[in-house]
Image (cartoon, rainbow, N blue to C red):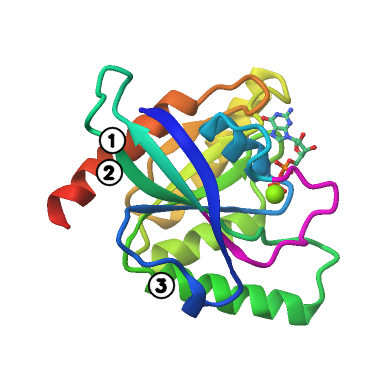
C-alpha cells in the first residue's frame, strides 16, 4: 500500500461526535509512552501528524485521521480511503481515578459500538517484559470478541535476544489464556521497520470491507 495523504479530520470527546461510519476504520491503542504517536507518524510517513508528547496522558479524545491510499504506485485509479484512529493511551501513572474512569467509559464504548471498526491494533513495548496492564487489556479485547492485532514497538531499543525474549514471553502469556493467538507484528519507528507488513494487512482488510459494504 502507498499512502497518498493523511490528515486529522476529527477529535471526539464522546461517541456522538465521531465521523460517519462509512469507511473501514483501524484503531491504535496502548499504554501511554508505548510509542503510538511515533508509530502512527512512521506508518503514514508524516512526521508531524501525531504529536510525540513530552507530557503523556494528556489527550483524552478519539482522533480520526483520514488516509487516502492506493494498493501500489501503479494503481492510479484504485484509490481508497480509510480511517486511522489514535485512541488515548492507558496506564498513565499520574492520571486521577476520575480521568481513568472517563477514559475507560469512552474507549470501551467506542470499541464495542463502532460499526466500521475493522481491526484494533494493540501496541506493546518490546523493550520491557510483559506488563499486567497490557495483558489485561488484551484479555478484555478477547472477551469482547473485538478482532485485534499485536504490534510490538521499539524493537530497536534493546538487544535482539532480549526483544525476542520479551515478545515470546508476552505471546506465551496470551497462549496460556486463549486458544488462538492474534496476529502480531514487530515494529520500530526509529528504524522504520514493520511498516510494509502492517500497511499490507490494512490493504487486505480494506478490500474485504469494500466487498461486504
Ligand atoms: N528506541 C525507540 N524509541 C521510540 C520508538 N518509538 C517511540 N520511541 C520513544 O518513546 C517515547 C514515547 O513515544 P510516543 O510516540 O510519544 O509514545 P505515545 O505516548 O505512545 O504516543 C519517545 O521518547 C519516543 O522517542 C522506537 O521505535 N524506538
Ligand atoms: Mg502519543
Label 1 beta carbon less than 8 Å to ligand 2: no
Distance from disc 3 to disc 2, alpha carbons, whole Å, reads: 19 Å
Q: Which residue is mark 1?
A: 79
Q: Are marks 1 and 2 in contact (CB under 8 Å)?
A: no
Q: Nearer the viewer, residue 197 or 135?
A: 197
**Residue 12, above or below 208:** below
- Quick one: label 3, few (<14), some, or many (20+) residues within 10 Å? few
Secondary element at image label 2: helix
Give the Cα distance between marks 3 and 1.
Answer: 29 Å
Residue 1 is left or right of residue 61, and the answer is: left
Quarter of the image holding residue 29?
bottom right
Question: Is residue 181 visible to us here?
Answer: no
User: Going from the N terminus, do you reach mark 3 or mark 2 first?
Assistant: 3
Q: Nearer the viewer, residue 32 or 213?
A: 213
The answer to whether residue 207 is visible is yes
Q: Position of residue 69 (x, y in %)?
A: 37, 34
Which residue carries the number 2 mark? 205
Amino acid at each position: 500500500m502507498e499512502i497518498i495523504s493523511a490528515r486529522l479530520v476529527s477529535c471526539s470527546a464522546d461517541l456522538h461526535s465521531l465521523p460517519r461510519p462509512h469507511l473501514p476504520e483501524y484503531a491504535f491503542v496502548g499504554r501511554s509512552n508505548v510509542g503510538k504517536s511515533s508509530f502512527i507518524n512512521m506508518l503514514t510517513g508524516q512526521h508531524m501528524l501525531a504529536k510525540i508528547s513530552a507530557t503523556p496522558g494528556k489527550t483524552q479524545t478519539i482522533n480520526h485521521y483520514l488516509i487516502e491510499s492506493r494498493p501500489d504506485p501503479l494503481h492510479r485509479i484504485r484509490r481508497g480511503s480509510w480511517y486511522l484512529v489514535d485512541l488515548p493511551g492507558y496506564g498513565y501513572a499520574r492520571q486521577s481515578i476520575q480521568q481513568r474512569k472517563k477514559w475507560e467509559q469512552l474507549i470501551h464504548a467506542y470499541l464495542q459500538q463502532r460499526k466500521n471498526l475493522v481491526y484494533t491494533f494493540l501496541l506493546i513495548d518490546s523493550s520491557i517484559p510483559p506488563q499486567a496492564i497490557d495483558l489485561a487489556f488484551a484479555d478484555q479485547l478477547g472477551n469482547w470478541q473485538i478482532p485485534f492485532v499485536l504490534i510490538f514497538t521499539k524493537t530497536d531499543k534493546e538487544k535482539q535476544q532480549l526483544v525476542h525474549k520479551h515478545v515470546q514471553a508476552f505471546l506465551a502469556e496470551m497462549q496460556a489464556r486463549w486458544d488462538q493467538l492474534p496476529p502480531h507484528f514487530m515494529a520500530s519507528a526509529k528504524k522504520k521497520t514493520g511498516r510494509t507488513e502492517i500497511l499490507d494487512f490494512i490493504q487486505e482488510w480494506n478490500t474485504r470491507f469494500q466487498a461486504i459494504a
